[in-house]
């Protein structure tokens, strides 16, 4: 799913802008904080790190994590639930877990083209923002190096529930080195879905599009399908889908429940 760098709990941007201004005032000292910011994400593994590839990472999700899972899942259920499921009594607010959140995402994907899936995610995200949020974001965060670094920094703590542990890293954007990269160690969404199409259509492309076109802050996401890590680069304009390496990515044939092992490219990426 999409990573928004805006706390949902407030109906306005008051808390967000307060945090913004306090950070802006200390901008001269902020560079040292951006060197490496990490969070362990409530991981239940003894090492405190994601499980090795091929093993599913265990998490200890609290009320904060479950609240966000519920918010996103309930919004997406409007698009993915069948009539029979819609007529059934909804789960309690804290009855959703990560598996049920991913299951709702999978239902949204089924029967929709690549572009339709991405449009659903955009509508879900827009429905969770207060009126005028994109315009206010553009005013607060014009596409500068500082804005890119700031959003990278707050991505780490606010969205560990969605992607797992991550850290801010140095990247190069237009020949300039800056701390506007986020390295996701092992994406929880990709790990739990096991689906290339869900990663690309329900997370990567809509997130890039939302930040770049709605918020005016370019963002490129580079998932690594070999180790399930991902790199987010704030400030970098994403390439057209046809020129992106992910457009040629095959299925996870051994773990994806809807994979087509005979196809050279994940079918969900080739359908417009």
Image (cartoon, rainbow, N blue to C red):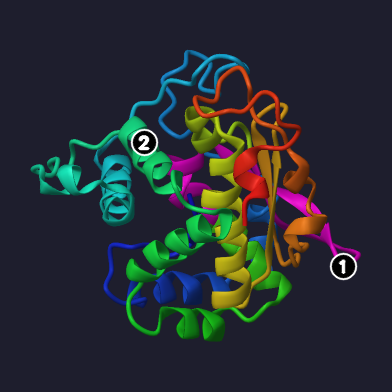
Which residue reaches farthest right? 175
- Judging by the rendered image, the residue that carries numbered circle 1 is 174
Does 116 sit left or right of 79 as displayed?
A: right
* Quadrant assignment, res 42: top left
Q: Residue at x 60, y 75 (%)?
A: 213
Does 35 sit left or right of 63 as displayed?
A: right
Q: Nearer the viewer, mark 2 or mark 1?
A: 2
Q: Residue at x 78, y 53 (%)?
A: 244
2 or 1: tag closer to the N-terminus: 2
Does 36 sit left or right of 65 as displayed?
A: right
Q: Is residue 235 shown to the viewer in this render?
A: yes
Give above or below for 193 relative to 78.
above
Q: Which mark is residue 135?
A: none
The alpha-carbon separation of the residues under discs 2 and 1 comes to 39 Å
Q: Please check the rendered image and state whether residue 160 is part of the magenta-colored stretch, yes or no.
A: yes
* Quadrant assignment, res 184: top right
Q: Is residue 215 shown to the viewer in this render?
A: no
């Amino acid at each position: 799913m999409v990573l928004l760098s805006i706390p949902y709990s407030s109906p306005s941007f008051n808390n967000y802008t307060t945090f913004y201004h306090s950070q802006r005032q200390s901008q001269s000292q902020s560079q040292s904080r951006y060197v490496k910011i990490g969070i362990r994400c409530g991981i239940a593994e003894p090492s405190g790190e994601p499980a090795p590839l091929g093993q599913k990472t265990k998490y200890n999700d609290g009320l904060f994590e479950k609240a966000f899972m519920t918010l996103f899942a309930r919004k997406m259920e409007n698009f993915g639930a069948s009539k029979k499921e819609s007529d059934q009594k909804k789960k309690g607010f804290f009855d959703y877990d990560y598996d049920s959140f991913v299951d709702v995402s999978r239902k949204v994907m089924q029967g929709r083209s690549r572009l339709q899936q991405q449009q659903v995610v955009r509508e879900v995200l827009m429905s969770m923002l207060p009126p005028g949020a994109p315009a206010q974001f553009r005013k607060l965060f014009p596409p500068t190096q500082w804005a890119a670094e700031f959003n990278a920094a707050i991505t780490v703590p606010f969205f560990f529930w969605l992607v797992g542990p991550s850290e801010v890293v140095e990247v190069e954007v237009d020949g300039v080195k800056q701390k506007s990269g986020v390295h996701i160690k092992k994406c929880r969404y990709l790990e739990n879905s096991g689906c290339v199409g869900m990663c690309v259509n329900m997370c990567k492309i809509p997130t890039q599009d939302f930040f770049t076109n709605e918020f005016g802050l370019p963002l490129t996401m580079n998932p690594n399908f070999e180790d399930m890590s991902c790199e987010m680069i704030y400030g970098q304009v994403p390439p057209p889908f046809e020129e992106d390496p992910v457009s040629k990515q095959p299925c996870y044939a051994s773990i994806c429940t809807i994979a087509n092992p005979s196809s050279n490219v994940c079918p969900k990426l080739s359908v417009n």
